[in-house]
Amino acid sequence: FRPLLLLRDWLLRVVGSRGRHVVKLVMRELSSPPLLSTLLAIVVGSIKPVQDLIFGKDAPLALLADTLNMLSGCAVPAILISLGATLSHGPGVAKVPLRIILSVMVCRLVILPLLGIALVIGSYKAGLFTPPDTVFMLVLLIQNTAPTAILVHTMSAVHQNGDQEVSALLFWQYLVSIISIPPYLSLFLWTIGQTYSPQQQQAGGA
């Protein structure tokens, strides 16, 4: 984290006392492990020589890749345990206003899936990507219907910033998603059937 600390000190000198709080807040968010791991993944995924160092049988750092694969196998069970622990006590003691809960649920479980349909189908029609099969398209669409990731609660608990409120919002989102996901799943399957053509993909590939 040394480069981030140096950047923070330089920004503090530039903006003066008025912007110190904002700079500290931004740098704290930039130094969060999920964001750093995402940025590192983008770098590794974008640079072919770096990939060759880590992935492959003859890669010098193949042991690192094997270790990461082993750890990733534990990620889903650990997340499910964390989710169960978060939701086991209901919405918790936080007094989140009803309008906030409804607003978050409408945006996350109603509006965002519709935007996801427009983005995925629009990108496919524009030729920005070529899906290998219908399952690929379905996964892209389903990702937009899921409730907020449990990792958000973990981050709020680590930073001690509204973890009770986030827990309440997650509880209601996961409860309502039992009702909201099946209709969207039917809509996704119908949309894929109307827009995706395997014959057209084969003709385009030929």
Image (spheres, rainbow, N blue to C red):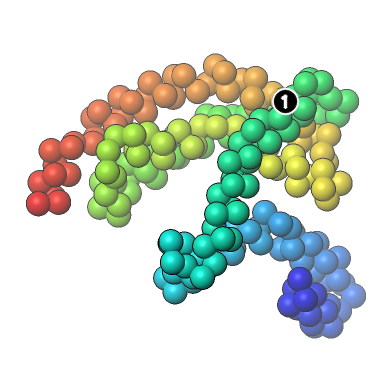
Residue found at the far top of this picture:
179
Quadrant of the frame with the N terminus = bottom right
Q: In the structure shown, which secondary structural element does the residue marked by tag 1 occupy?
A: helix
Residue 72 picture location, percent across and down: 59, 45
Quarter assignment of residue 187: top left
Q: Which residue is mark 1?
A: 84
Q: Residue at x 30, y 29 (%)?
A: 191
- Name the side, left or right, on which 183 lies relative to 110: left
Kindly tell me whether residue 134 is visible in this rendering.
yes
Q: Quadrant of residue 80?
A: top right
- Residue 96 spot, x, y in % from top left: 80, 29
Considering only vertical position in the picture, is 86 above or below 136? above
As displayed, is residue 75 above or below residue 194?
A: below
Q: On screen, 158 above or below 46?
A: above
Residue 8 seen in this snapshot: no
Most extreme residue toward the front, as rendered?
A: 58
Residue at the (82%, 39%) spot, across then down: 163
192 to the left or right of 83 = left
Judging depth in this view, the residue of 147 and 134 nearest the camera is 134
Question: Foreground residue, 35 or 82?
Answer: 82
Relative to 86, is 72 above or below?
A: below
Residue 28's x, y, as percent?
79, 62
The amino acid on which the numbered mark 1 sits, given as a three-letter code, is Gly
Who's the residue at 50% across and 23% down the image? 181
